[in-house]
Each structure stands twice: as structure tokens, then as C-alpha cells.
Image: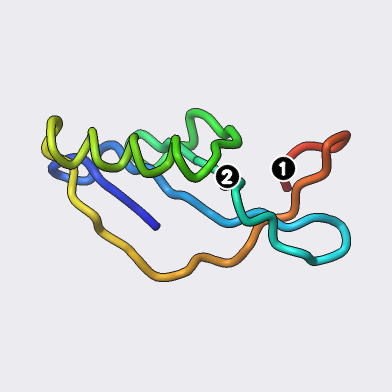
Amino acid sequence: MQISAKGGTIVLDYYPIKGWDNVIQANKHLRILSFKGETQTKRIVNTTQLDEEVRDRVDNFNYSITGNKDNLPQFHSQHGGVK
């Protein structure tokens, strides 16, 4: 999923996460915040956090859902981080 601020200056992308065994972790998502095309932060959020953040930004801060297709799962290892 992707949401963007008006004009696309700020973009939030959410990706499913998979482990070394290629199994998708159902309640975990990689959240990437970009500003003017430059990645600012990456962090792991759960489904509740994702839903609350998207709802809040769309309802209260004029963000739009700009992509709602399933994104490719990203690899995550508890020791190695997100790749």
C-alpha cells in the first residue's frame, strides 16, 4: 500500500515482510517514509499501527491512497534488519 501527501512530496509505502524461509509474517509490515524521493526512515509496524496511521493521515492530513496493490514482500531478519 502507498499513501501520499498532496503533491507527492511525502510518500509512505507499506510492504509485507517475509523471513529467511520465505514465509510472510501476517501481522508485520515494513513502513518506508520518503520525502521528495529520498528515503527518510524505515521501520517495522504491525497491522493495527498501519491501519491507524493510514486512516489518520487520510482523514486528518489530506493524504491520498496512491497505490493499493500488494507490494512485493521484503526480507527481514531479526539480526540483520530489512533488506
| Quarter residue 63 falls in | top left
| Quarter residue 51 falls in | top left
Residue type of the residue flagged with mark 2: Leu
The earlier-in-sequence mark between 2 and 1 is 2
The residue at 80%/66% (across/down) is 22
Q: Mark 1 points at which residue?
A: 82
The residue at 49%/45% (across/down) is 47
Residue type of the residue flagged with mark 1: Val
Quadrant of the frame with the N terminus: bottom left
Q: What number is the disc on residue 46?
A: none
Judge left or right: residue 6 versus residue 2.
left
User: Looking at the picture, how far across and down is residue 55, in whole percent?
Assistant: 25, 41
The residue at 29%/49% (across/down) is 3
Callout 1: 10 Å neighbours few (<14), some, many (20+)?
Answer: some
Q: Name the residue under label 2.
A: 30
User: Looking at the picture, how far across and down is residue 45, in whole percent?
Assistant: 55, 36
Q: Name the element at disc 1.
A: strand
